[in-house]
């Protein structure tokens, strides 16, 4: 394992363009509870009862209530050493992107800047009429079903997350695909690699001969193309891999 980590670290040090592709596994040690684990009022519901466009058009008030509850859960947890290690690597590199499937906002809170949130961000909302985006500073807009703050719009705001049956934002997908296709290093952290189309990212990087480094507790759909499979929890292995890296762009 030590030897593999060292080789993977060398590959990162030599890389010019790095994409980090993450999923639920990187947030696991932060202890983001699922709404069911958190118990209480929502215990008996399934995500499918709320996270669909149909649910929102039928019961917008309940859906908003549920999302406010989940935002509170997300605010109570902190980024873990895995998120911080990724953010510090970005600090030292000029050509760097995080493409995450998580909606928990933890990469941004850890200091990552060039983040594509493929499935949205639970702290953000947007107007269904004019598209106005409300970020975290305005996360709690007034009203049980918040209305667009833009004067004269009157549109209904909805959480900026990808719901069941919805497509990923094509611009986000294009940008991450493009970046992956040009990357010479792809770090895959805490994702099974089975949820498409996002899971295409490491395969696109591999097609460009990128070095693919995977950190996961178990082999995944990506392990077959990984140059280095580092088995273990993301919060432990990621800092171990990145802390001793020389960080500088293209360093030999
Ligand atoms: Zn609007």
Image (tube, rainbow, N blue to C red):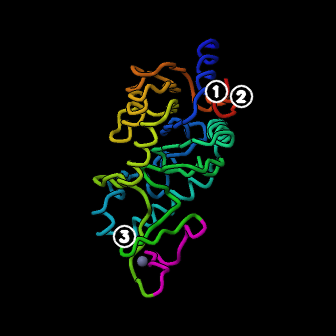
The magenta span reads 137-151
Q: Position of residue 155 (x, y in %)?
A: 38, 78
The residue at the point 46 percent across, 48 percent down is: 36
In terms of depth relative to the viewer, which is nearer, 60 or 158? 158
Q: Residues within 10 Å of mark 3 (few under 14, many from 20)?
A: many
> Which quadrant of the structure image shows residue 59?
bottom left
Q: Number of callouts in the render?
A: 3
Q: Quadrant of ligand 1?
A: bottom left
> Which quadrant of the structure image shows residue 52?
bottom left
Do callouts 2 and 1 mark residues in contact (Cβ within 8 Å)? yes
| Residue 237 in view of the camera | no
Which sits earlier in the primary sequence, circle 2 or circle 1? 1
Image mark for residue 60:
3
Which residue has dot 2 on it?
246
The residue at the point 69 percent across, 33 percent down is: 248
Which residue has dot 1 on it?
13
């Amino acid at each position: 394992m030590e030897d593999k980590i060292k080789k993977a670290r060398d590959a990162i040090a030599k890389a010019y363009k790095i994409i980090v592709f993450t999923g639920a596994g990187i947030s696991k040690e932060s202890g983001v509870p699922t709404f069911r684990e958190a118990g209480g009022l929502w215990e008996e519901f399934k995500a499918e009862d709320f996270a669909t466009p149909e649910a929102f058009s039928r019961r917008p008030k309940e859906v908003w209530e549920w999302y406010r509850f989940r935002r509170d859960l997300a605010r109570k947890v902190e980024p873990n050493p895995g998120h911080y290690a990724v953010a510090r690597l970005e600090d030292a590199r000029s050509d760097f992107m995080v493409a995450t499937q998580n909606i928990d906002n933890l990469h941004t809170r850890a200091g990552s800047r060039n983040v594509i949130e493929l499935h949205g961000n639970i702290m953000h909302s947007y107007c269904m009429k004019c598209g106005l985006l409300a970020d975290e500073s305005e996360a709690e807009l007034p009203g049980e079903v918040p209305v667009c703050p833009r004067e004269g719009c009157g549109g209904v705001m909805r959480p900026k997350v990808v719901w069941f049956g919805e497509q990923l934002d094509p611009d986000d997908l294009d940008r991450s695909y493009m970046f992956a296709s040009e990357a010479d290093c792809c770090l895959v952290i805490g994702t099974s690699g089975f949820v498409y189309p996002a899971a295409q990212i490491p395969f696109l990087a591999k097609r460009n001969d990128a070095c693919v480094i995977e950190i996961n507790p178990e082999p995944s759909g990506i392990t077959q193309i990984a140059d280095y499979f580092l088995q273990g929890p993301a919060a432990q292995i990621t800092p171990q891999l990145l802390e001793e890296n020389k960080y500088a762009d293209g360093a030999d």
